[in-house]
Image (spheres, grey):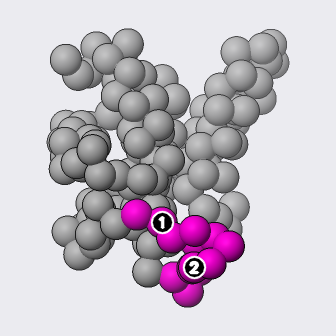
Amino acid sequence: MEEWQPTYALLQMQASLELLKSLEREPALKTQMCEIMAMVSRRCAARALRADGSASKLDLTMTCSDWRSGEGLSSQGKYRPVWYNIRESGEAALTQLIDQGAAFPAEQQRLLTRAITRLDYDRVSSCGIFYLQAAYWKARRCGLMR
């Protein structure tokens, strides 16, 4: 799997593998799925760390301009890194939490907590808050957060 794959693609793959693993009856294939899920989790741990480092350099309260008259989510726009940072923080955590065979280390728990608490929810406009919420509730179900 290429390193350049976006984090949302890793999340989608992890969710698909979770379902396939639950249905698979052949032990060798199940083992292979677990190995792939672990590799994806490791990649997302690094991405969560990178997103955390980038967050301090961004105005996470910035709102997106109208796509019809402004930059919108253009890759050259100023808002896209903000939008993606919030989103990637949640996606990377959720991807790791889907992998039930791996631990969600204390450092990753701190990164998720920081990603959730650093936002001003009265001013954030990124859809990434939904990934953060999903990661929070998944962590709660796993007994990792209060």
Stretch of the chain drawn in magenta: 63-77
Location of residue 5 (image quadrant)? bottom right
- Amino acid beneath label 1: Cys
Q: Which residue is mark 2?
A: 70
Image-quadrant location for residue 142: top left
Check the image and name the residue furthest to the front. Answer: 69
For marks 1 and 2 on the same chain, the one whose residue lies earlier in the sequence: 1
Residue found at x 62% / y 38%: 14
Who is closer to the viewer here, 5 or 103? 5
What is the x, y in percent for residue 80? 49, 71
Residue 115 is inside the magenta segment: no
Q: Is residue 34 visible?
A: yes
User: Residue 127: image x %, image y %?
Assistant: 50, 47
Tag 1–tag 2 contact (CB < 8 Å): yes
Q: Is residue 68 above or below residue 130?
A: below
Q: Which residue is mark 1?
A: 64
Residue 66 drawn in magenta: yes
Residue at image point 67% right, 42% down: 12
